[in-house]
Amino acid sequence: MRMTRNRRKKRDVENDREWSQPRSNDIPVKKNIYIILIFVAILGITIEATRSQFILQVSSNKSGGSGVQTDEPKQNAISQEEIAKLAKERFLILHDSKDESSMAIARNVEQMLRYMKKEYDLADVKQFSKPDSQYMTVIVTIENLGLLADLDAILQYAHNGGNVFLSRTPEYNDSLYRIYRKLGINSIDLPIVTNGIQMTSNLLIQGEDAKIGAESIVNSSIPVELDRKAKVHAVSADNMPLLWEAQHGQGKFLVYNGTNMQSAMNRGLIAGGISLLNQDFMYPIFNMKITYIDDFPAPFRQGIEPSIYREYRKDIPSFFRDVWWPDMIKLAADYDVTYTGAIIKTYNNRVAAPFTDEEGTDSNNLITYGRDLVKLGGELGIHGYNHQSLVTDEATASHYEYKAWPDEESMAESLSYLNDYIKKVFSSYDVQVYVPPSNVLGAEGRRALKTSFPDLRVIASLYAESDSTHEYIQEFSVAEDGIVELPRITSGYSRTDIHDWYIANAITSIGVFSHFVHPDDVLDKERSNNKSWPELVNDFQRMMEELYQHYPWLRSQTASEAATSLESYLQTDVYIAHTDKKVTGYMNNFSDEMYYILRTNKKMTSLVNCTVEKIEEGAYLVHATGAKFEIGLEE
């Protein structure tokens, strides 16, 4: 304070002296004032420009941004002649083509093995005699073991070192009664209904506490008393064994005493089960963490929400600007979260031209929140011109209380208007991601999207099977039209047992966390479970914190970055060779990196072209940086 006062006094003295000079010095003084005023004006214009559309218009994702693929040549680690000499990791899926439940489980196992890049054969139990020793594991999807022509051959295969995964509750009959002791069972009884599931091991990565409540899952199970040597991996809510392993000779049996292995949300049990049965087992994963904000940026509802006003003394738009968005930014910074937004221009229900009205539009939201999103390293995707799903089918639209579009041309016209709206703010930004409203999309809507957004390369809908036949369900893949299918897996600000179960299964099976929220969930009592924003943000904070603590190795990505990673993964051919002291990976069509999960109880002795990070006991993340990589192992 003393120095400041002295400076002020000195400046006052200098001013007195200046005014005491002859008036002939006025001209240079005025010149200095004009120079200062011009400088201040330029500075003001510059500052304002940084706050205006100007700065946004030069924002670009055309080079070096998300989703840009490199033109570097692919690497090949192994020739076709060498591949033919490798001992293949091969699996057998046994099914009954006349049993839809068996076929549904077989399809789910088949998809999981494709993600793992493992070779497999499908065999109808009626044409099957006995398993070849070439198979690492036989996955049995039938209920009636009496359909097997030679049950003893299965027992002998396991006794000689093979592994058998019974992925469905065996039927209570003479065939089961004949072999139940070989399955690690001391006694059995007639089937009963069991509720819930609780893991008791880390078969799911970081999922030893994962569970689904008794009210959420029902199984048909056989009451069993297990041999003390059997290892239990999951039980029902009332402690009935649901998943266990039992040694048989040199091999193993893994038994699932349930009836829901056909669900995509249980693929972690398949991946974990296969990993458990096979020593030093390694498989590739996507390794991505994606977080979407649907309906953002978008116009916020005007007016006052009583609960928010009581808490914050703010109307709805001010709440989102001053409370919700700063909280979301802090979460992103604290827990390595990258947001992909899904823009909505208006919430009108117009499905026919003209689409040029400005009713319900708030371009300031696109400017303000869009700028922040991009500055945070996030991405701008689209949700639609409005929130009407892109379908012409009346039944589908009315199911969601939407309007059906009259034709594909109307959809394309509305989307073109949305594109023009975005380009006015982000003139150099190429929109690459589309999130369908209510996860509903028709073939005609897909074509309209490609017409109006030629740079679009990602559609993000849903991964899991749904009770609704209208929703667009995806696998992680590249479609025939070149669009990357990048489904979302979980949603909402608050955790539930099912939510945690889905996360543990998805990360164990494919190494993916893909989640979405809506800004206005807090305004909807059903979606918010009647919780206030302080409660919701606290729930979301705990969710992101635990995810970051348990799976810090997941790569936080925008949707288009994840799509590029997925394309690279899908294009890469993987071959794994095993010895007692080494695991060797060979990759053809390899770009620059690939990630794997390695399940082993051995110690690492050497690493070539890779790094290894311990995830938890017996589970490791392998980051391969060369087309051929090696991991030395010892007991």
Image (cartoon, grey):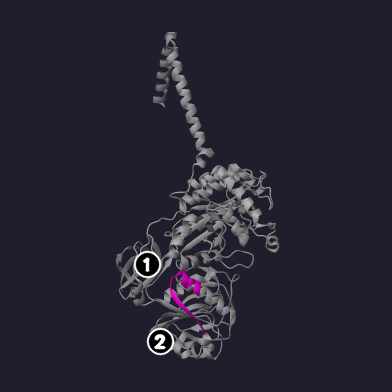
Tell me residue 261's x, y (percent).
Answer: 54, 75
Of residues 457 and 471, the one drawn nearer to the viewer in this rendering: 457
Quick check: 593 above or below 330?
below
Disc 1 versus disc 2: nearer the observer? 1
Tell me residue 548's x, y (percent).
Answer: 45, 58
Tell me residue 501's x, y (percent).
Answer: 52, 67
SS for tag 1?
Answer: strand
Q: Name the residue type under label 1.
A: Met
Q: Does residue 431 appear in the picture of this structure?
A: yes
The residue that label 2 is drawn on is 159
Q: Give the extent of the magenta segment.
A: 110-124
Q: Residue at x 34, y 77 (%)?
A: 85
Of residues 93 and 535, the one drawn nearer to the viewer in this rendering: 93
The residue that label 1 is drawn on is 587
SS for tag 2?
Answer: helix
Of residues 567 and 135, the one drawn nearer to the viewer in this rendering: 567
Q: Name the residue type under label 2.
A: His
Q: Is residue 600 left or right of residue 336?
A: left
User: Counting other residues with Cα less than 10 Å from the Cα at mark 1, is it few (<14), some (14-19), or many (20 or more)?
Assistant: many
User: Counting other residues with Cα less than 10 Å from the Cα at mark 2, is it few (<14), some (14-19), or many (20 or more)?
Assistant: some
Q: Residue at x 44, y 70 (%)?
A: 116
> Residues at badges 1 and 2 in contact (C-beta under 8 Å)?
no
Q: Is residue 349 magenta?
A: no
Ranked by sequence position, the earlier of labels 1 and 2 is: 2
Tell me residue 309's x, y (percent).
Answer: 64, 45
Of residues 392 and 315, the one drawn nearer to the viewer in this rendering: 392
Q: Is residue 114 magenta?
A: yes
Q: Quadrant of residue 312?
A: top right
Marks 1 and 2, how far apart at CA: 33 Å
